[in-house]
Image: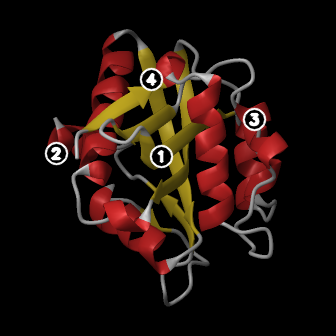
Amino acid sequence: MKLSILMNDKINQNWFEKMLEMDRRIFPAEGNDYLEPDYIRSLYKQVKEGLFFCVDEDINRLAGYFTVIFLDEKQRDEYLNGSHFSTLLNKGMKKGKNILYLYTLAVEEDYRGTACMKLMGKAFARWLDTKIQEGYEVSEVYAEAVSEDGARSLKNGFGMTPMRGADEKGIGHYVSDDQLKSYIIKML
C-alpha cells in the first residue's frame, strides 16, 4: 500500500465525488451526522482550500479525508448557541484573523491503524503553519465530536478541550485553547 496526500486545489472532481461516496457510507442519511452531498459541494464551490485526502495509490482508492472550513463571528455564535453544523458556510481563509472549524474526519475501516490519519494530520499541520507564516492568523478553532472516536481524535490527536455541554462520552463541541499551536509543533 502506497499512501499519499492530495490537498486543496490538487483535488479534482473525481476525488471529490469519491469523498462524497465515502461520506455517505460512513455517515448514512438516517444518522444525525449526515450531510447532504449538495451541501458539502457548496462548502468548497468557491475554493478547495481545507481539503486533505489520503489516497492509496496502488489501487487508486480514497483511504480517508479531513475537511476544514472557516467561519465568521456570526456563524460561530449561532452555531455555538444551538444551530446544527449543517448550517455552516465556508467563508474561506483570509489575511488576518480566521475562525477555523475542523469539519469532518473519516478513515475507511481497512485503513484504520495505518499511517492514513497521521499523513493527513501532518499535511494539515504543514499547510496551516505555512499559512500562518504567510500572515494568516487562526484566532479561534472549534470542532464537534459526533462519535466517541471523534471525541478521542479531538482530545488526544488535536489536543482540543470539550466545551460545556459535551456529554460523558465526549460528544459535543470542542475548542483549541492555543489555536492548534501545540498540534502543529507535534506534527511537524
Judge by depth and name the residue closer to the eye, 74 or 47: 47
Instruction: Work out how far the residue at label 3 is from the one at label 1, CA to CA, in angstroms.
Output: 14 Å
Judging by the rendered image, the residue that carries numbered circle 3 is 41
Secondary element at image label 2: helix
- Label 1 amino acid? Tyr
Looking at the image, residue 10 lies above or below residue 73: above
Instruction: Work out how far the residue at label 1 is from the one at label 2, CA to CA, in angstroms.
Output: 20 Å
Q: x%, y% of residue 36? A: 81, 52
Q: x%, y% of residue 182? A: 23, 45
Rendered residue at 75%/73% (across/down): 32
Judging by the rendered image, the residue that carries numbered circle 2 is 186
Instruction: Work out how far the residue at label 4 is from the one at label 3, CA to CA, in angstroms.
Output: 25 Å
Judging by the rendered image, the residue that carries numbered circle 1 is 65
Looking at the image, residue 89 lies above or below residue 143: above
Rendered residue at 59%/54% (across/down): 22
Q: Residue 137 carries which label?
A: 4
Residue 42 image-quadrant placement: top right
Count residues near mark 3 (Cα–Cα under 10 Å), then give few for <14, some for 14-19, many for 20+.
some
Dots 2, 4 in contact, CB < 8 A: no
Question: Looking at the image, is mark 2 or mark 4 earlier in the sequence?
Answer: 4
- The residue mark sitting in front, 2 or 3, is 3
Secondary element at image label 4: strand
Judge by depth and name the residue closer to the eye, 139 or 156: 156
